[in-house]
Amino acid sequence: MGLGKWVCLIFILHVFLALPISSNPEGLAQNSVDFLDYAREPEISEWMIGIRRRIHENPELGFEEFQTSELIRTELDKMNIPYKYPVAVTGVVGFIGTGKPPFVALRADMDALAMQEGVEWEHKSKIPGKMHACGHDAHVAMLLGAAKMLQKHRDDLQGTIVLVFQPAEEGGGGAKKMLETGMLENVEAIFGLHVSNRVPVGSVASRAGPILAACGFFDAVISGKGGHAALPQHSIDPILAASNVIVSLQQLVSREADPLDSQGTPHPPKCTWAILVVTVGKFKGGGAFNVIPDSVTIGGTFRAFSNESFLRLKQRIEEVITLQVGVQRCNATVQFINPFYPVTTNDKDLHKHFQNVARDMVGAQNIKEMPPIMGAEDFSFFAEAIPGYFFFLGMKNKTKGHLEPGHSPYYTVNEDSLPYGAALHSSLATRYLLEYQKPIPTWPKKSLHDEL
């Protein structure tokens, strides 16, 4: 780094660290800008990139994030940030501020996916069959970046910021297990983010109310009677039964949901939300061209945008499978895989808070309205128990080429997005503590005799 850049950095750090966090409207807006300016400086931005790449090289699956957790704890120790560990096996919960109310939480998920990375680059996954293909490595790096900035202002905070490093988002329900520990029972609000390849870098996207669907998974074993393919009359064909089940399951969406009901108006006994998904993604049965197998296994996912619709859909899936296979003289056992993820619903008051912070930081023109999408997030468990808010952080930059969607072996992260995430974390939390202070009640003075 040249002398000029060092002088500029020292000046920015001096200004940033010298200014307390302001609570007046003009100061609140400036706080957001200051956090973003600081996050863009190499001390933070390059450090976050390094953290993200170290995590990317060593991906770990849900509840196995021991090295990731150790890295997080090491960095928190360097910052003198106290924390609790282990929380829900590998989770870490850090604390910055007074240690007293109000408490506001920031969450990052840590786990990777069981897939082989197809991207050839210097920091490719070193673990065969495991890859950070959903941006969780970036999420951890951004929350650590926010922690680094917030710790420098710990004496100015009017409350406590809780750093939630969560295991097992990818199907393990790590958020639910963290809640069950009681570590977050005093938290009044929680914020989470996810990087997005569909939103431009420097922009954010979200909405009030439901934003991500409730999600569940099922397995069904359909049993018949195996035999020679040339003599089907002596067999009970589970492949035929399974094929009819798959067709019938699709009719739950096309024939049992009101096509005009886009707002979730209940029309029992139909499902109460037109936005439903039932997808069979697994079909296993047979291993020879001329043999009818004894059994077939199918499995899939189902999703809905209200918890009522979700439970009704679950009931109908089981009914359709068990009754439909009976038409072909087969039997079926259906297993639903826990935990189910509820609908992710953004608190309306926190939506206003988010819009104010994002507008001051990136400009109103860079705040996008996100339509509901059928993806699912276990942040929903937090938002069900605590007022919560989940948003998407842009990564798209046409000049840097196409970004593959999450869960692709060719998934990459645009690291230019990291300063925005760290700054938004910081500003959302600090402004929340300033704006949501509860007045301390004043009681009329009484003597001891009066109280008796």
Image (cartoon, helix red, strand yellow):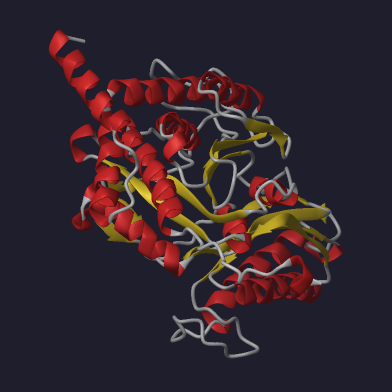
Looking at the picture, tell me which residue is in the foreground, 304 or 319.
304
Q: Quadrant of the C terminus?
A: bottom right
User: Left of 374 or right of it: where is 361?
Assistant: left
The structure residue drawn at horizontal position 63% and vertical position 61%, both measured from the top left corner, is: 385
- Residue 302 spot, x, y in % from top left: 61, 63
Would you identify the image quadrant in which residue 99 lies? top right
Report whether 432 appears left or right of 174: left
The image quarter in which residue 118 lies: top left
Position of the N terminus by quadrant:
top left
Which of the two residues, 88 or 227, is positioned nearer the viewer here? Answer: 88
Q: Which percent across, then down, holds residue 38?
A: 29, 31
Q: Please determine whether, in this image, residue 110 is positioned above or below residue 197.
A: above
Question: In percent of the image, x 32 and y 29: which residue is there?
Answer: 17
Residue in the image at 34% along x and 42% along y: 21
Residue 313 falls in image quadrant: bottom right
Foreground pick, 180 / 409: 180
Q: Tell me where residue 123 appears, x and y as whole percent.
A: 43, 18
Q: How many marks?
A: 0
